[in-house]
Protein backbone atom coordinates (compact mmCIF):
# COMPACT_ATOMS: atom_id res chain seq x y z
CA UNK A 1 0.00 0.00 0.00
CA UNK A 2 1.43 3.37 -0.97
CA UNK A 3 2.64 6.03 1.40
CA UNK A 4 -0.09 8.50 0.45
CA UNK A 5 -2.83 5.94 1.00
CA UNK A 6 -1.39 5.10 4.42
CA UNK A 7 -1.31 8.81 5.33
CA UNK A 8 -4.95 9.19 4.24
CA UNK A 9 -5.97 6.11 6.22
CA UNK A 10 -4.08 7.42 9.27
CA UNK A 11 -5.77 10.80 8.95
CA UNK A 12 -9.19 9.12 8.79
CA UNK A 13 -8.27 6.95 11.78
CA UNK A 14 -7.19 10.06 13.71
CA UNK A 15 -10.51 11.77 12.92
CA UNK A 16 -12.49 8.72 14.03
CA UNK A 17 -10.41 8.33 17.19
CA UNK A 18 -10.95 12.00 17.98
CA UNK A 19 -14.69 11.49 17.58
CA UNK A 20 -14.56 8.58 20.05
CA UNK A 21 -12.46 10.50 22.60
CA UNK A 22 -14.30 13.77 21.99
CA UNK A 23 -13.87 15.87 25.11
CA UNK A 24 -10.20 15.12 25.71
CA UNK A 25 -8.77 14.99 22.19
CA UNK A 26 -9.47 17.61 19.53
CA UNK A 27 -8.56 17.93 15.85
CA UNK A 28 -9.77 21.11 14.14
CA UNK A 29 -10.17 19.83 10.57
CA UNK A 30 -9.30 17.08 8.14
CA UNK A 31 -6.32 19.13 6.93
CA UNK A 32 -5.06 19.14 10.53
CA UNK A 33 -5.55 15.35 10.61
CA UNK A 34 -3.48 15.01 7.41
CA UNK A 35 -0.70 17.13 8.92
CA UNK A 36 -0.92 15.06 12.11
CA UNK A 37 -0.60 11.83 10.10
CA UNK A 38 2.50 13.18 8.35
CA UNK A 39 4.07 14.38 11.61
CA UNK A 40 3.33 11.05 13.32
CA UNK A 41 4.91 9.20 10.38
CA UNK A 42 8.05 11.34 10.68
CA UNK A 43 8.21 11.05 14.48
CA UNK A 44 7.72 7.27 14.30
CA UNK A 45 10.46 7.00 11.70
CA UNK A 46 13.01 9.33 13.32
CA UNK A 47 12.37 9.83 17.05
CA UNK A 48 10.74 6.58 18.13
CA UNK A 49 13.72 4.32 17.25
CA UNK A 50 15.99 6.53 19.35
CA UNK A 51 13.59 6.45 22.29
CA UNK A 52 13.29 2.67 22.01
CA UNK A 53 17.07 2.33 21.90
CA UNK A 54 17.65 4.59 24.93
CA UNK A 55 14.91 2.95 26.99
CA UNK A 56 15.68 -0.64 25.99
CA UNK A 57 16.52 -1.81 29.54
CA UNK A 58 13.23 -0.44 30.92
CA UNK A 59 11.32 -1.89 27.96
CA UNK A 60 12.94 -5.28 28.57
CA UNK A 61 12.22 -5.10 32.30
CA UNK A 62 8.53 -4.30 31.67
CA UNK A 63 8.26 -6.98 28.96
CA UNK A 64 7.55 -4.37 26.28
CA UNK A 65 4.82 -2.47 28.10
CA UNK A 66 7.01 0.64 28.23
CA UNK A 67 6.42 0.95 24.47
CA UNK A 68 2.94 2.25 25.34
CA UNK A 69 4.63 5.08 27.23
CA UNK A 70 6.85 5.83 24.24
CA UNK A 71 3.80 5.94 21.96
CA UNK A 72 2.07 8.36 24.34
CA UNK A 73 5.16 10.58 24.38
CA UNK A 74 5.16 10.60 20.55
CA UNK A 75 1.48 11.67 20.57
CA UNK A 76 2.18 14.44 23.10
CA UNK A 77 5.12 15.62 21.00
CA UNK A 78 2.89 15.69 17.92
CA UNK A 79 0.34 17.74 19.89
CA UNK A 80 3.05 20.32 20.57
CA UNK A 81 4.09 20.43 16.89
CA UNK A 82 0.75 20.33 15.07
CA UNK A 83 -1.46 23.40 15.51
CA UNK A 84 -5.11 22.42 15.88
CA UNK A 85 -4.39 19.08 17.56
CA UNK A 86 -4.90 18.99 21.33
CA UNK A 87 -4.61 16.17 23.87
CA UNK A 88 -5.58 16.79 27.50
CA UNK A 89 -2.88 14.69 29.14
CA UNK A 90 -0.61 11.68 29.19
CA UNK A 91 -3.31 9.06 29.80
CA UNK A 92 -5.48 10.48 27.02
CA UNK A 93 -2.45 10.40 24.72
CA UNK A 94 -1.90 6.74 25.61
CA UNK A 95 -5.57 5.91 24.99
CA UNK A 96 -5.50 7.88 21.71
CA UNK A 97 -2.45 5.89 20.62
CA UNK A 98 -4.05 2.53 21.41
CA UNK A 99 -7.42 3.33 19.83
CA UNK A 100 -5.86 4.92 16.74
CA UNK A 101 -3.61 1.89 16.23
CA UNK A 102 -6.59 -0.46 16.37
CA UNK A 103 -8.71 1.66 14.02
CA UNK A 104 -5.78 2.15 11.64
CA UNK A 105 -5.15 -1.61 11.50
CA UNK A 106 -8.81 -2.36 10.82
CA UNK A 107 -9.02 0.27 8.08
CA UNK A 108 -5.83 -0.92 6.37
CA UNK A 109 -7.06 -4.52 6.45
CA UNK A 110 -10.43 -3.46 5.03
CA UNK A 111 -8.64 -1.58 2.25
CA UNK A 112 -6.86 -4.81 1.31
CA UNK A 113 -3.39 -3.73 2.32
CA UNK A 114 -0.90 -5.44 4.53
CA UNK A 115 0.04 -4.07 7.93
CA UNK A 116 3.83 -4.27 7.47
Image (cartoon, rainbow, N blue to C red):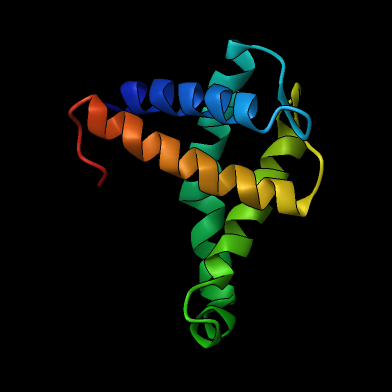
Relative to 52, is 108 above or below? above
> Where residue 43 appears, x then y in whole percent?
55, 45
How many circles with numbers are drawn on the protein? Answer: 0
Residue at image coords 26%, 43%: 115
Residue drawn where x is 51% and y is 51% of the image: 46
Residue 62 place in picture, x, y as percent? 55, 82
Query: Which image quarter: residue 51?
Result: bottom right
88 relative position to 67: left or right: right
In the image, is residue 61 above or below residue 35? below
Q: From this viewpoint, is residue 39 visible?
A: yes
Task: Please provide percent x and percent y for residue 114.
Answer: 20, 39
In depth, the one of 112 and 83 nearer the eye is 112
* Residue at x 59% of width, y 12% of height: 31
Looking at the rendered image, the quarter that the N terminus falls into is top left
Q: Is residue 49 left or right of residue 31?
A: left
State the residue lying farthest toward the right: 88
Amino acid sequence: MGFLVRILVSALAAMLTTYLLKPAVKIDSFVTALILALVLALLNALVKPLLVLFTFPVTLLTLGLFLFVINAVIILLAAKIVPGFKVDGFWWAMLFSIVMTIINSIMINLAGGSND
